[in-house]
Amino acid sequence: METVNARKRKNTEVRDAIAAERRELADLFDTLSPEQWDEPSLCAGWRVREVVAHMSMGFRLSLPRTLAELVRARGNLHRMTDRVARRDAAAHSAGALAGFLRDNARHPWTPPVGGFAAALGHDVVHGLDVTVALGLDRRVPEDRLRILLDEIRPSGLRFFGVDLDGVRLCAEDLDWAYGSGAPLSGTAQDLLLLAYGRRLPAGRLRGEPGSRFTHPAEDL
């Protein structure tokens, strides 16, 4: 059974990972060209700038304002986040959007479910939504990936609409696997994206089930 001290130590480690991830991503976003900010991301319908705007929404919107936005969207969370991301992407410069992440590296925001591990997942996966779509070779540090891979559960897969029936995910760069069935191999961070409901560019996964989780080359 996990002790109180162990939980505190784990939370501290995860919060340190969150802060490092936000600062590193902010530095990377500062290097993007204006054209790259307008490129599509792995988030369907969002450019890079909408993704980065969304990443800081939890820091910038108070709870009452968030609830007001949700009411305005008639209770539809996806509609609300889409509207806010598009509005804020248009309202703020690229430098400001990157700065929100850097300035809030230690912000204690967490999603409604999942605690600090879920907050880390939010940052890492949205960062990959940008870097993978742009073809940038950023490697998420192993310690951060392991935190998130260890958190993969059937409930989370259902939330993101991921069907792994008959599929075993096998990381090529880490000693990690999940599920049972036909092996599907890729880098740990690509498999993490898959577990968060993303479709990957063709050629990044190896194994017979790969076509279920990739975009055809002509769609890119």
Image (tube, helix red, strand yellow):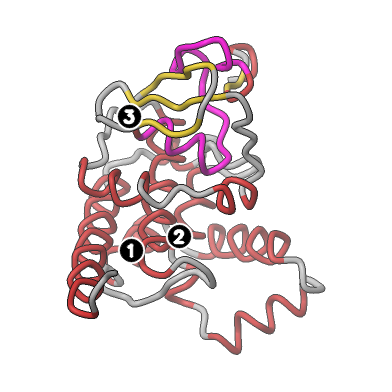
Residue kind at label 1, given as amino acid type: Leu
Place of residue 54 in the rendered image (x, y in percent of width and height, measured from the top left): 51, 60
Check contact, mark 2 vs mark 1: CB within 8 A. Answer: yes
Residue lying at 37% horizontally and 61% vertically, measured from the top left:
117
Check contact, mark 1 vs mark 3: CB within 8 A. Answer: no
Place of residue 186 in the rendered image (x, y in percent of width and height, measured from the top left): 39, 21
Residue lying at 42% horizontally and 38% vertically, measured from the top left:
192
Q: Please give the count of numbered marks on the rendered protein.
A: 3
Ranked by sequence position, the earlier of labels 2 and 3 is 2
Residue kind at label 2, given as amino acid type: Met
Ranked by sequence position, the earlier of labels 2 and 1 is 2
Extent of the magenta region: 189-211
- SS for tag 1? helix
Residue 158 lies within the magenta run: no
**The N terminus lies in quadrant:** bottom left
Q: Which disc number belongs to residue 55?
A: 2
Kindly give the residue lying farthest to the front in the view shown: 1
Check contact, mark 2 vs mark 3: CB within 8 A. Answer: no
Place of residue 166 in the rendered image (x, y in percent of width and height, measured from the top left): 60, 24
Decide which of 37, 17 is in the foreground and name it.
17
Q: Which disc number belongs to residue 87?
A: none
Q: Write down the residue under mark 1.
A: 101
Q: Write down the residue under mark 3.
A: 136
Place of residue 108 in the rendered image (x, y in percent of width and height, measured from the top left): 34, 77
Residue kind at label 3, given as amino acid type: Leu
Side (left or right) of 45 relative to 132: right
3D distance between C-alphas at marks 2 and 3: 19 Å
Say few, some or many: other residues with alpha carbon within 10 Å of mark 3 (under 14 / 14 to 19 / 20 or more): few
- SS for tag 3? loop
Side (left or right) of 147 relative to 198: left
Say few, some or many: other residues with alpha carbon within 10 Å of mark 1 (under 14 / 14 to 19 / 20 or more): many
